């Protein structure tokens, strides 16, 4: 009896394993569709980058690379300091009795460093924009084209002011 139950269990296990390993082989088309779905976004981004890069002249490309390298070099120390402050904040939070004043001070320092880096990014973007024609700006910086057009809130509804929400509740 033990042999029969052991044989049945082994047979059942091998059937299950065979079914799982063959799933992808049964329908190669399905696997291809899955692969395409996962790779769509990077492909689109790559296509967009390539088409935009073709619009730039060689002088523009080299000037942009120089600006990016200069910004990277200028902000290296700030970025390193930001990493150190974040690590220090993690250490402060992990203590048995966290010092709220020190945590608050470190958080403010982190915010200041982040602000500094963001301003540098905005400056770089403006300098790059100055190198481009109007058409190139439209292609490279699509979020600037939109401006304030997207005024919808969550769920596709139009955004409402606080007074409008209060009026609908009453």
Image: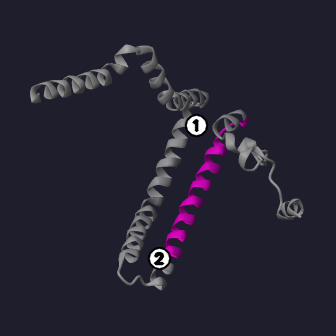
Q: Residue at x 48, y 85 (%)?
A: 101
Q: Secondary structure at mark 2?
A: helix
Q: Is residue 102 left or right of residue 59?
A: left
Q: Is residue 146 left or right of residue 82?
A: right
Q: Residue at x 41, y 75 (%)?
A: 93
Q: Quadrant of the C terminus?
A: bottom right
Q: Residue at x 78, y 47 (%)?
A: 157
- Local packing at callout 2 (Cα closer than 10 Å; few below 14, some 14-19, many 20+) is some
Dot placed on the residue nearer the N-terminal end, 2 or 1: 1
- The residue that disc 1 covers is 60
Q: Which residues are magenta?
A: 106-134
The percent coordinates of residue 125 (x first, y second) are 61, 49
* Of the pair 55 and 108, the residue shown nearer to us: 108
Q: Distance from label 2 to label 1 (Cα)?
A: 40 Å
- The residue that disc 2 covers is 106
* Of the pair 50 and 153, the residue shown nearer to us: 153
Q: Main secondary structure of the magenta part?
A: helix
Q: Secondary structure at mark 1?
A: helix
Q: Residue at x 46, y 49 (%)?
A: 69
Residue 133 is inside the magenta segment: yes
Say above or below: 139 vs 83: above
Between marks 2 and 1 in the image, the one whose residue lies nearer the viewer: 2
The percent coordinates of residue 2 (x first, y second) are 10, 30
Residue 6 position by quadrant: top left
Residue 89 position by quadrant: bottom left
Residue 59 is inside the magenta segment: no
Q: Is residue 110 left or right of residue 18?
A: right
Q: Quadrant of the N terminus?
A: top left
Residue lying at the far front in this picture: please name it.
Answer: 1
């Amino acid at each position: 009896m033990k042999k029969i139950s052991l044989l049945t269990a082994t047979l059942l296990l091998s059937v299950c394993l065979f079914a799982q390993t063959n799933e992808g082989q049964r329908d190669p088309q399905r696997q291809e569709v899955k692969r395409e779905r996962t790779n769509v976004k990077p492909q689109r981004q790559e296509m967009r980058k390539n088409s935009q890069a073709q619009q730039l002249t060689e002088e523009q490309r080299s000037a942009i690379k120089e600006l990016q390298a200069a910004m990277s070099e200028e902000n290296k120390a700030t970025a390193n300091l930001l990493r150190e402050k974040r690590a220090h904040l993690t250490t402060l939070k992990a203590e048995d009795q966290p010092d709220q004043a020190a945590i608050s001070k470190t958080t403010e320092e982190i915010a200041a460093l982040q602000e500094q880096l963001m301003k540098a990014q905005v400056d770089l973007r403006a300098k790059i924009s100055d190198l481009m024609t109007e058409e190139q700006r439209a292609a490279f910086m699509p979020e600037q084209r939109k401006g304030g057009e997207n005024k919808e809130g969550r769920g596709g509804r139009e955004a409402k002011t606080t007074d409008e929400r209060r009026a609908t509740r009453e």
